[in-house]
Image (cartoon, rainbow, N blue to C red):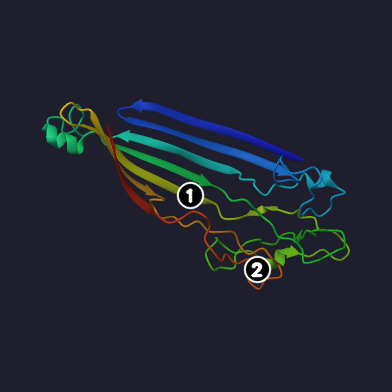
Amino acid sequence: NADYKSLQVSVTRRSAKGLSLQGSYNWSRAHGDVDSDFQEPWWTGPLQNTYDLKTEAKDIASFDVTHIVKGYVIYNLPFGRGKMLMSDVSPLTDALIGGWALDGAFHYQTGTPISVVSTNSYPGFANVYVNLVSGCKLTNGKPELGKVWLNKSCFADPTAPNLGTAGLYQEQVRNPGFGSEDLALHKSLAVGADKRYNMTLRIEFFNVFNRDALAGPDTNKADSTFGKILTYGNVGGRVGQFGARLTF
């Protein structure tokens, strides 16, 4: 069983003085006992109690991302003939400075839920969930690479032979979110005596501000590094590239 709720707000501004933009905000909530509608009906996965799927289906889903903000901006730079600035330049100068456009894209989102399971092991159970200690602070400050971020004492093993109550994923604490911005400068130029050739130039920077994207912490209670963020996530560092294309 799976239940997904979503609310999206989008804002679009058409070209005005060379500026166009679009942005969207998405709030969502996903609960369920499966990660995909395409899993087989007999799939049991790592659920604690396959005999109580009604309760399991109320838990937060592993892919739940509560907040997503993303969008783009396009700005036709006001330089060159027919533009607001430097409109009386020579044709050669116009070919160099005119017709350029600046593109920007951004994407920010919160993280997915943490999953900590008990070290208890009972016959017939794939996982035993932990109990969250009431009033315990789950994290230690903000997430940082190499820092013990999760407070292990907050994730208690249930007394045998009881089952845990915190679910497979704990929505009270989430993996680090991420944000990135991309920037591109590009132009098209008709060349040749009859303007039959078209040259496109493009300069691009991905993750232009070189933001870090931390991976989730070690959530294996048996590890000495439990709660520590050991690596970066899958958002790479800043990358720049230049491209040119001739169409004829």
Q: CA distance from mark 1 to mark 2?
A: 25 Å
Q: Quadrant of residue 13?
A: top left
Q: Position of residue 31 (x, y in %)?
A: 72, 43
Could you say where residue 16 lies in the image, as x and y percent from the top left? Answer: 33, 26
Residue at (39% x, 36% y) in the render: 73
**Foreground pick, 134 / 92:** 92
Question: In which quarter of the view is residue 193 placed?
Answer: top left
User: Which residue is most to the bottom?
Assistant: 224
**Mark 1 or 2, nearer chain start:** 1
The quadrant the C terminus occupies is top left
Q: Nearer the viewer, residue 48 or 23?
A: 48
User: Looking at numbered disc 2 in the image, what kind of residue is underneath it?
Assistant: Phe
Q: Residue 198 vs residue 126: left or right?
A: left
| In the rendered image, the vertical position of residue 238 relative to residue 185, given as above or below | below
The x and y percentages for residue 105 are 42, 41
- Please give the residue where the numbered disc 1 appears in the rendered image: 179
Q: Position of residue 92 (x, y in %)?
A: 13, 35
What mark, if any, has residue 226 been given in the picture?
2
Secondary structure under the numbered disc 2 in the rendered image? loop
Residue at left 40%, top 33%? Answer: 21
Quadrant containing the N terminus is: top right
Q: Amino acid at mark 1?
A: Gly
